[in-house]
């Protein structure tokens, strides 16, 4: 049995649905008002679905024409459909570890070329914590964090 992990789009959609339900309860909207509001929000300007993240590299750094592009330019060109849409440096490492390493060195030497929309693991974690802090008090997140650590130590939860 395989379980698919939800995409960032699916996670965002679920988060928005919960936020919408909370807002309806907070402002005491009756079902008819909530439905009208949902309809107006989902009217014609609904965003297009996000592209599916690639399973294999569209083009490998090692197969490029040498000297044509630096690692930042290559990454921006090859991964343009996914950058800023849930694609992060962990995905890049899985698809092309050589490019990941070259890009890291390039960005250290050329900070002006850093691809900000391609977050590091720490930046992704920080963003998720910031999202959770919008809905849960810090004390609740501290309890959750503590319980996760206890489960890992007890062997009841395996870290990624």
Image (cartoon, rainbow, N blue to C red):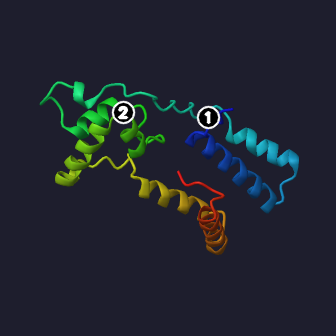
Question: Residue 19 location in percent, x, y?
Answer: 70, 54
Q: Secondary structure at mark 1?
A: loop
Question: Residue 121 location in percent, x, y?
Answer: 43, 53
Are discs 2 and 1 less than 8 Å apart at CB?
Answer: no
Residue on which disc 1 sits: 46
Q: Quadrant of the N terminus?
A: top right
Q: Secondary structure at mark 2?
A: loop
Q: Is residue 75 left or right of residue 21?
A: left
| Residue appearing at x 37%, y 28% in the figure | 57
| Residue appearing at x 12%, y 31% in the figure | 67
Q: Nearer the viewer, residue 52 or 101?
A: 101
Q: Is residue 114 left or right of residue 142?
A: left
Residue 38: give its label.
none
Question: Residue 88 location in percent, x, y?
Answer: 42, 44
- Determine whether 109 is above or below 81 in the image: below
Using a 10 Å C-alpha cutoff, classify the residue at mark 2 as few (fewer than 14 neighbours), some (14 to 19) or many (20 or more). Answer: some
Q: Nearer the viewer, residue 100 or 116?
A: 100
Q: Nearer the viewer, residue 50 or 128?
A: 128
Q: Is residue 27 visible?
A: no
Q: Is residue 75 left or right of residue 95?
A: left
Q: Is residue 130 left or right of residue 89?
A: right
- Image quadrant assignment for residue 152: bottom right
| Residue appearing at x 44%, y 40% in the figure | 87
Residue on which disc 2 sits: 79
Question: Residue 35 location in percent, x, y?
Answer: 81, 43
In the orientation shown, which residue stands out farthest toward the left?
67
In the orientation shown, which residue stands out farthest toward the front?
155
Using a 10 Å C-alpha cutoff, classify the residue at mark 1 as few (fewer than 14 neighbours), some (14 to 19) or many (20 or more). Answer: few
- Determine whether 142 is above or below 105 in the image: below
- Mark nearer the viewer, 2 or 1: 2
Mark 2 to mark 1: distance in Å?
Answer: 24 Å
| Marked residue nearer the N-terminal end (2 or 1) | 1
């Amino acid at each position: 049995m395989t379980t698919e992990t939800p995409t960032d789009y699916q996670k965002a959609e679920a988060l928005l649905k919960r936020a919408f339900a909370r807002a309806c309860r907070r402002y005491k909207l009756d079902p008819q008002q909530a439905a009208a509001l949902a309809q107006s929000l989902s009217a014609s300007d609904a965003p297009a679905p996000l592209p599916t993240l690639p399973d294999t590299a569209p083009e490998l750094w090692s197969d490029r024409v040498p000297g044509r592009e630096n690692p930042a330019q290559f990454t921006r060109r090859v991964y343009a459909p996914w950058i800023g849409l849930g694609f992060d440096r962990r995905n890049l490492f899985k698809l092309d570890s050589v490019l990941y390493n070259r890009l890291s060195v390039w960005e250290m030497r050329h900070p002006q070329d850093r691809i900000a929309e391609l977050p590091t693991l720490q930046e992704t974690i920080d963003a998720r914590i910031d999202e959770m802090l919008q809905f849960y008090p810090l004390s609740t997140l501290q309890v959750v964090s503590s319980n996760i650590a206890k489960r890992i130590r007890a062997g009841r939860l395996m870290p990624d």
